[in-house]
Amino acid sequence: MPVSASPPVLSPDQGEPSSGVIICSDPFYTPTTTNRVISTTTATTTSECRMVDVHGIKVASFSVGGQDELICLPQVFDLFLKHLVGGLHTVYTKLKRLDICPVVCTVEQVRVLRGLGAIQPGVNRCKLISRREFEALYNDCTNARLVVISFIF
């Protein structure tokens, strides 16, 4: 059921030109376009959130300090992995076996992800993985289901 949402408001900084930061006035806001960029700044790092294409579906992605693009693990789990594995615990077991260490989101990143609808409104923690790490995880999940045991009698 579609939920009507009020449009985002671009918030200009005090006495400065518009910074392009999106403020969602509706807690269940889902963006209608995917070309928006949301920037968050902390004392130590700046991160930029974009909606990127992963296997034909748009997912939230952070580019932190010019490093690898980091995608939202709970979102890609929900979109691509939950029908392949028993649950999120299985994913974390696979990550450990594949020697993949997810990055913990900052509070600002969690707020942005909630605002975009990438994670549920009540979620206050989230982890990010690189696209390359996601592909390794996805391949592991899909190939694990193709194992066929044949018995010779």
Image: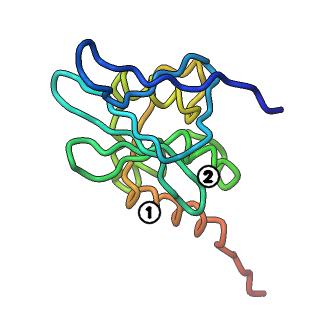
State the CA–CA distance, disc 2 to disc 1: 12 Å
Residue drawn at point x = 59 percent, y = 36 percent: 31
Question: Against 129, is 135 above or below?
Answer: below
Q: Looking at this view, name the residue that lies furthest to the left.
A: 44
Residue drawn at point x = 52 percent, y = 66 percent: 139
**On the rendered image, what quadrant is the N terminus found in?**
top right
Callout 1: 10 Å neighbours few (<14), some, many (20+)? some
Question: Against 49, is 148 above or below?
Answer: below
Question: Against 81, is 142 above or below?
Answer: below
Please give left or right for residue 140 compared with residue 105 in the image. Answer: right
Give the residue type at disc 1. Answer: Ala
Give the mark nearer the N terminus: 2 vs 1. 2
Callout 2: 10 Å neighbours few (<14), some, many (20+)? some
Query: As rendered, which of 137 and 78 lies closer to the eye?
Result: 78
Query: As rendered, which of 133 and 43 lies closer to the eye?
Result: 43
The circle on residue 136 is: 1
Q: Looking at this view, name the residue that lies furthest to the right.
A: 1
Query: Residue 46: x, y in percent?
Result: 23, 33
Please give left or right for residue 131 compared with residue 13 in the image. Answer: right
Residue beneath disc 2: 81
Give the residue type at disc 2. Answer: Leu
**On the rendered image, what quadrant is the C terminus found in?**
bottom right
Query: Residue 91: x, y in percent?
Result: 53, 47
